[in-house]
Amino acid sequence: MGPAETLAETPPSAKLVFKALEYDGSLTQAEIAEETLLPRRTVRDALSRLNDAGLVEGRVSFRDARQSVYSLTDDGERATPTAADPRR
């Protein structure tokens, strides 16, 4: 199963978190919750699912080592519609 199919199998909340990261680049969990209006627990679950699927990765924030900054992986980048469709 490719990255796009893997993303298609995730729940709507995970897709929304994915889209926020696709649009904004790197975000903390709090920033994702603010951007998507999802509860932090839902964001945490979505990030866990996306991380397990290899679509998102978290790194320690340089601004605050207590936080992680999340971004799309290479597979996550390939899961985007524009990456899958060369006409765009």
Image (cartoon, rainbow, N blue to C red):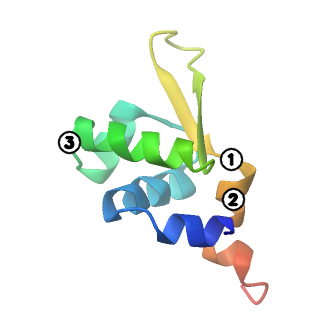
Q: State whether residue 70 appears in this view.
A: yes
Identify residue type, mark 1.
Thr
Task: Place residue 13 in its image quadrant.
Answer: bottom left
Identify residue type, mark 3.
Pro
Residue at the (63%, 47%) spot, across then down: 54
Q: Which residue is mark 3?
A: 39
Do the CB atoms of the residues marked 1 and 2 lie less than 8 Å apart?
yes
Callout 2: few (<14), some (14-19), or many (20+) C-alpha neighbours within 10 Å? Answer: some
Q: Which residue is mark 2?
A: 77
Quarter holding the C terminus is bottom right
Q: CA distance from mark 2 to mark 3?
A: 25 Å
Q: State whether residue 79 appears in this view.
A: no
Task: Identify the residue at the far front of this view.
Answer: 1
Image location of residue 80, percent across then percent down: 62, 69
Callout 3: few (<14), some (14-19), or many (20+) C-alpha neighbours within 10 Å? Answer: few
Q: CA distance from mark 1 to mark 2?
A: 6 Å
Identify residue type, mark 2.
Glu
Image location of residue 30, percent across then percent down: 34, 32
Residue at the (20%, 42%) spot, across then down: 39
Do the CB atoms of the residues marked 1 and 3 lie less than 8 Å apart?
no
